[in-house]
Amino acid sequence: MKIKIEIDENIVEEEIILHCRELNDETIAIQKQISEAVNTGLKLTVGRGDMEYFLDLKEILFFETAGSTVAVHTANQIYETHLRLYELEELLPGNFLRVSKSTILNSGKIRSVRKNIAGASEVEFEGTAKKAFGSVSKYVNSDCFQKAKISNSFGECNVFFNNAILAGSSASIKVENSFGSTNVYLPSTWRIVTRQAGP
């Protein structure tokens, strides 16, 4: 492996690029080591209760929106930040990835990724039992659509019916959602009638 440094006084921001034949374990390990070296010492101001803390970025597992605030998860604690996810995206280094409209993950801390029943990604982290849930998008392209059932547990589920054509004059869509968000996108020409099931 060759290491080459190019000096250019006109660049605005330094950049490290790895050129490789394929993405393998060695390449990922090098990327991880470079990322850790570059981001050593970077801190984020967070709060918990009436206390303010200065967290090393390497301690953070993930960020997620929690109502009107953004929760900052470490292996053992949950803090809050006044920053919005779009602001964090601009500030954080490249090992932090936006995986849904409500979650940013630290890719350097991921142990495994698994699809759950709803098709969303369930992410487990090194050294903790904490999990984060990503998003899934489904597209319904039926020319004789009659009914659908959407079940989502945790995570974010987006279902697009924009290209669906009704088989008759009506159709039904049943949505079951627990501990997550489900977004259903329908053609603007459809007349929508909603019914909420009882407990």
Image (cartoon, grey):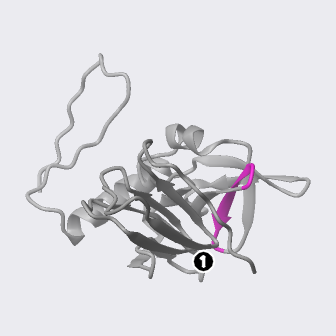
Give the percent coordinates (x, y) of residue 36.
44, 56
Q: Is residue 193 magenta?
A: no
Is 25 on the left or on the right of 107, as rendered?
Answer: left
What's the magenta region? 67-75
Residue at the image position 23 percent from the left and 44 percent from the top: 17
In what quadrant of the picture does the N terminus appear?
bottom left
**Foreground residue among 194 and 158:** 194
Give the percent coordinates (x, y) of residue 178.
63, 75
**Looking at the image, which residue sits at the far front?**
169
Residue at the image position 31 percent from the left and 57 percent from the top: 31
- The residue singled out by tag 1 in the image is 130
Is 11 on the left or on the right of 98, as rendered?
Answer: left
When the figure is inspected, residue 21 is found, relative to residue 15, above or below; the finding is below
**Foreground residue among 153 and 183:** 183
Mark 1 neighbour class, 10 Å CA radius: few under 14, some 14 to 19, many 20 or more: some
Q: Residue 27 falls in which quadrant of the image?
A: bottom left
Residue at the image position 58 percent from the left and 54 percent from the top: 57
When the figure is inspected, residue 74 is found, relative to residue 8, above or below; the finding is below
Is 10 on the left or on the right of 148, as rendered?
Answer: left
Is 143 on the left or on the right of 178, as rendered?
Answer: left
Query: Main SS of the magenta segment?
Result: strand
Give the percent coordinates (x, y) of residue 115.
40, 78
At label 1, the amino acid type is Lys
**Foreground residue among 9 and 139:** 139
- Local SS, label 1: loop
In what quadrant of the picture does the C terminus appear?
bottom right
When the figure is inspected, residue 181 is found, relative to residue 153, above or below; the finding is above
**Foreground residue among 8 and 149:** 149
